[in-house]
Amino acid sequence: MTMINIMGASLWGGGEQYVYDVCDELTSRGIENYVLVDEHNRLFMERMQPVSHIVPYNLQKWKGFMSIHTLARTLTKLGITVICCHSGKYVLLSIALKKLVGCKLLFFKHNVIPYKTDIYHRWITSQVDAFICVSQLVYDKQTVPARTDKFHMVYNGVNPRRFAKNTTANTRDTDFFTLGYAGRIRENKGVYDLIDAAVILHKHYPAVRLFLAGHGTPQALEALQNHITANRAESFVQYRGFYEHVELFYKDLDILVLPSKVAEAFGLVLCEAMYLGIPVLTSSSGAQTEIIEDHKNGYIIASVNATSLALKIKEIYENKEDLPAVIENGKKTVASRFMINKTVNKIGEIINHL
């Protein structure tokens, strides 16, 4: 098996981290793998280079298709046997390459979007060899009833090698109770509600502070800073940028909060924090409920707004004696269900049966 993953996003998010971790696991097993990265995205190429071979390509519309035969010849020379597509934006390119190279095509589903049965999507389904859904929720939404044989549920997993180089003790300041958010900076991720909750809490508990980390568009980051400033929260709410080594961010936290208002397809940041012994709080908007059981291995809120977040965090803050058991259960959950070696094993089994 020689795999190539197509990476076409402009910002690094959960799907891109998924590709990185799968490639890292394959490389650790001595299995050749490649990533097709837009030639203009130097950041992605630099980030992926340690774990995979890079195939730069112009993924811009039209220009990419004009040179598809050249790309197909390159993939043939590399001995590619499996193409992995992670976005509908590149599924036509993937199908064309599959036919020209003569290999298998996997389509990884990272979004909670209901399946479609129009003629175009029926054709797409007929061309893809297997669909990999990253959670049961995604599987239930995406699976085409007439083609259940092509759909598989494979959970994402934590890559321990990403954390092995930074295993120093926690750096969090015990004079504070530090909340953290790691993810895309978007309103529908509940970031503003979390800031407003921190403002409410800080009035009664001055030790509470909030750190934010992740990518965002320039407009989103400007709006974020404006919101912090408008609430006069600069002294206890900080945007810390994007962390390539996110474990360095987690180590400053007392609790990680993922307050999404939209359905999350999985929730890797939750598993990463749990693996590192950081308790987590999330919403019940998506597949997070497949990972978290409230008060057992983490915490869940049913609806996301500033008041509900503040009340739940207040409850956790005032019952810190419960945290050691929650943390230990979180570690056990991840170790038994959500590790990248398990993910790659299952993907390998699916490929072997195609």
Image (cartoon, rainbow, N blue to C red):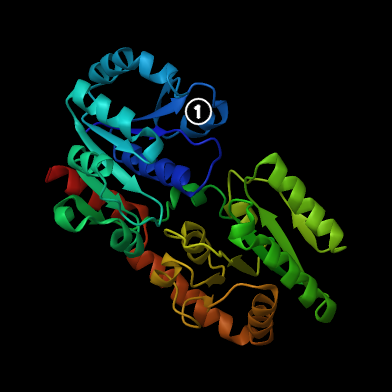
Image coordinates of residue 87 in percent, x first then y, are: 39, 40
Report whether 241 appears left or right of 348. Answer: right
Q: Nearer the viewer, residue 13 or 146?
A: 146
Q: Is residue 239 left or right of residue 182?
A: right
Q: Quadrant of residue 34?
A: top left
- Check the image and name the residue furthest to the left: 353
Q: Number of marks in the image?
A: 1
Left or right placement of residue 351 versus residue 234 in this view: left
Residue pictured at 60% horizontal, 66% vertical: 256
Quadrant of the rendered image containing residue 101 = top left
Q: Nearer the viewer, residue 221 or 142?
A: 142
Q: Secondary structure at mark 1?
A: helix
Task: Name the residue beneath numbered marker 1.
Answer: 45
Q: Quadrant of the N terminus?
A: top left
Asked if residue 142 can be seen in this view, the reply is yes
**Image height check: is 12 above or below 33?**
below
Foreground: 262 or 104? Answer: 262
* Mark 1 crowdedness (10 Å alpha carbons): few <14, some 14-19, many ≥20: many
Residue found 66% across the figure and 63% down from its top: 180
Residue at 54% x, 22% y is 40
Q: Residue furthest front?
A: 118
In the rendered image, the vertical position of residue 7 relative to residue 78, given as above or below: below
Q: Position of residue 3 (x, y in %)?
A: 28, 33
Quadrant of the image containing the C terminus: top left
User: Residue type at mark 1?
Assistant: Met
Q: Is residue 32 visible?
A: no
Residue 90: image x %, image y %? Answer: 37, 33
> For the point 64% across and 45% down, which residue is it?
216
